[in-house]
Amino acid sequence: MTTHICKSISSMREFGDAWRAEKLRIGFVPTMGALHAGHAELLKRARAECDKVVCSIFVNPTQFGPKEDFALYPRTWEADQALCVELGVDAIFAPDAREIYRPNDCTHVEVAELSDQLCGVFRKGHFRGVTTVVYKLFAIVEPDVAYFGEKDFQQLVIIERMVKDLYLAVRIVPVPTVREADGLALSSRNRYLSAAERAQAAKIGKALSMTKYLVQGEMAADDLLEYVFIELRDANITQIDYIALVDSHTLRPTKDPHGARLCVAAYVGTTRLIDNVGFP
Ligand code: AMP
């Protein structure tokens, strides 16, 4: 089998149209490239559950703030392509930014309220960039199913809401976070970490995994947050955007851990990392 490379919207549409004509189910995994085992997990799920698999690789400029790492964001095209071939991806959609955003574009997709919580407070306009590009990608690929990682929990909730509110004909499948052996959630941004920072960063995942037991022991919400704060502080992670226990649907703060999500965003050195854990 062949992994087709589609750089243009028209070539991506040609494949999609042909597959739909054959009544084949299209699974879609949108990414920004620099693929790792987390992305691979999404692609494997798509491969197992769908007839055709599309992976988009697009470092979306509109979801980066002016002082963020768009220019520095890792781009590893050769390795990404090799992984897609290995995993049996049918098409890689890798458009140029000018293909996705035309100069006189004036339409945006914004999921109100959910986009203003958590990371939305610190990354103004970030989720508007995400929802706009994901909507465009859905319109181009027209997938039956799309896979999103729980690693970016707020993004997942926002996309699910966009699909619901706009009656989009795509099913969103959440995929649990893939972690390193020491608990660090895989992220393309982990490449920025020095060896010492890498060790610090692992403490975030460790602290979050411990909270599962604390919730089983009925620890109160404020104490849970305090526990994570102290663990991060002990690892010398002091620049913390938030440590929050939120309702899994509204993303609003809650005092009841059951069914809720504990979300963290913090800097390790200059690298901003996010992670989260859910409780039954
Ligand atoms: P990104 O390339 O960072 O935009 O991520 C593309 C997709 O992969 C998103 O749905 C992410 O949530 C998902 N993803 C990233 N890291 C992980 C991970 N460690 N485990 C599971 N999914 C992930």
Image (cartoon, grey):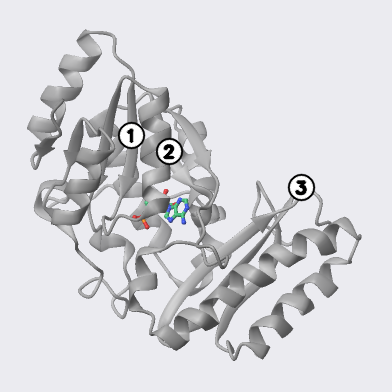
Mark 2 Cα shell of 10 Å, populated few (<14), some (14-19), many (≥20): many
Give the image location of residue 139, x and y in percent: 27, 32
* Amino acid bearing label 2: Tyr
Q: Which labelled disc corresponds to residue 147?
A: 2
Q: Is residue 146 among what the camera can see?
A: no
Labels 1 & 2 near each other (Cβ < 8 A): yes
Left or right placement of residue 147 versus residue 231 in this view:
left
Work out whether residue 78 or residue 164 is closer to the camera in this orientation and state it. 78
Horizontal and vertical percent for residue 38?
Answer: 42, 52
Q: Is residue 70 left or right of residue 239?
A: left
- Label 3 sits on what residue type? Gly
Which numbered tag is attached to residue 28? 1
What residue lies at 18% left-to-right and 33% top-to-bottom? 91
For residue 271, the mark is none
Q: CA distance from mark 2 to mark 3?
A: 22 Å
Q: Residue at x 42, y 57 (%)?
A: 127
Which disc number belongs to residue 259? 3
Label 1 vs label 2: CA separation?
6 Å
Q: Which residue is nearer to you in this view: 256 or 109?
A: 256
Q: Is mark 2 within 8 Å of ligand 1?
A: yes
Q: Position of residue 119 (x, y in %)?
A: 51, 67
Q: Earlier in the sequence, mark 2 or mark 3?
A: 2
Please give the name of the residue rendered at 91% of the width and 60% of the height, measured from the top-left corner. Answer: 218
Q: Amino acid at mark 1?
A: Phe
Residue 249 lies left or right of residue 53; in this view the side is right
Q: Quadrant of the N terminus?
A: top left
Provide the secondary structure element on which disc 1 rests: strand
Helix or strand or loop: what does disc 3 sit on?
A: loop
Residue 173 is at least partly visible in this image: yes
